[in-house]
Image (cartoon, grey):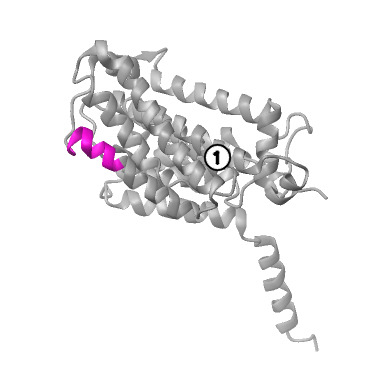
Amino acid sequence: MSTTTEQERPVLGSARFAVSKGLVTIVVATALLFLVCVLFAPSSVSSDALQGMLPIAAVLAVAGLGQMLVVQQGGIDLSVAGAMSLAVVTVTHIPDQDDSLLLPAVLLAFGLVVLGGLANGLLIGGLGLNPIIATLGTNALLYGVNLGISGGRPRITTNALQTVMTTSVLGIPSSVFFAVAALVLVIVLVRRTVPGRRFEFIGANPRAARAVGLRARLHQTSAYVWAAVLYGLAGVMIAGITAQPSAYSGDSFLLISVAVVVLGGTSLLGGRGYPVATVIGAVFLQQLVQFVLALGVSTAIQTIVQAAALAVGVSLYTVDWAGILRRVTGRRRRAAPAPA
C-alpha cells in the first residue's frame, strides 16, 4: 500500500524530477507577492529593502529547515527560540569582541545547542514524551544557561563575525550563501542517502517502519539533534547580522519557523519534507512582513500576519477543499426547485 499523500504527488515533471504541489504553490505565491509589492509598495522591493530582508530570510530559512526535519517525524520543536538565543549569547559574550576567541565560542555554541537537541531526542524518541511538553522543558533549560552566561544583557558582536555575515558577493549578502549551503546539505542527506530515505519513510509510517525492523526511535532522536545544529547556525548568523543582538533574539523565530515549513507543503503529521519550498517560504514570509511595514502598518501587526500565514498554510494543505466544494454544490442542486 502506498503511503504517498495527495500533496506529495508530483504535479510537474517526470518521476525523476518531480515538483511538489507545495513548491508550485509557494513559488506562485511569492511571485504574486513581489508583483503586489511593485504595484502598491515599491519601497519594499528597493535595493536597500532587499538587502535588509534577505539576511533575515536566510536566518529564517535555516531555522525552518531544522524545524522541517522535526516535523517530518510528526513532531514539533518549541526549543528553537532557546537554542538560537543561546547560540547568539555564546558567540557574543564569550569572545566579548575578541576575534581570537570567536572560533572556540562558535564551537561551544554548537555543542550547547546540540546537547539541547539530544535531550529533546531522548525525551521524545527514547521515552515517548509529548513533543510540545518535552521541547518546552528543554527550551526553559536552554534559557537558563543563556541567562547564566549573559544575565539577560546584550553584547556587541565581534568584528570578524560581523564581517563574515554582512559582506556581499555580487550584491548578494553572504548570509544567503550560508542558507543555500544548509539547504544543499539537507537535500543531500535526506534525499540522496539511504539513511535519509529511511528517515522519510519512518516519518510517513512509523508503525510500518518498526514492523520491517527500522530503528524508528533512533531516527526520531536524530531529527532533533540535526535540527539543533541548524538552529545553532541560525543563531550564529543572527549574531553576525545584528551589531548588538538581544539575549532573546530567537523568540521572534519560534512561530515563523513552523509557518515556513507548513507554507512549503510539509505535513504536520510527518512524512516527506520539502526543503526548497521551505526556503522559498522563508523569503515569502519575510517579504510579506516587509510589505506590511512599507504600508505604514504598526510592527505589532507582524505577529498577526505571521499567524495568518500559518493558518492559511495549514488550511491549504490539510482541508479537503474539493470535498467541501462537492458537498456545497450537491446541496445547492438538491435545494434548487424543479423546473416547471
Instruction: Answer with the quarter of the image where residue 82 lies.
Output: top left
Q: Residue furthest right?
A: 1
View extreme (bottom): residue: 340
Residue 120 placement (x, y as % from top left): 46, 43
Q: Which residues are magenta?
A: 143-152
Quadrant occupied by the C terminus: bottom right
Which residue is nearer to you in this view: 92 or 207? 207
Rendered location of residue 203, percent (x, y): 65, 45
Question: In the rendered image, is residue 46 in sight?
Answer: no
Measuring from the top left, give residue 309's x and y in whole percent. Answer: 46, 51
Residue 149: quadrant of the picture: top left
Name the residue: 42% across, 12% down: 170
* Residue linked to disc 1: 221
Q: Check disc 1: other Cα within 10 Å, few if <14, some if 14-19, many if 20+.
A: many
Q: Is residue 90 magenta?
A: no
Who's the residue at 79% across and 85% down the image?
339
Q: Is residue 57 above or below residue 22?
A: above
* Picture layout, residue 131 above or below residue 68: below
Q: Is residue 201 left or right of residue 275?
A: right
Q: Position of residue 173 (x, y in %)?
A: 38, 20
Name the kind of residue labelled 1 in the image: Thr
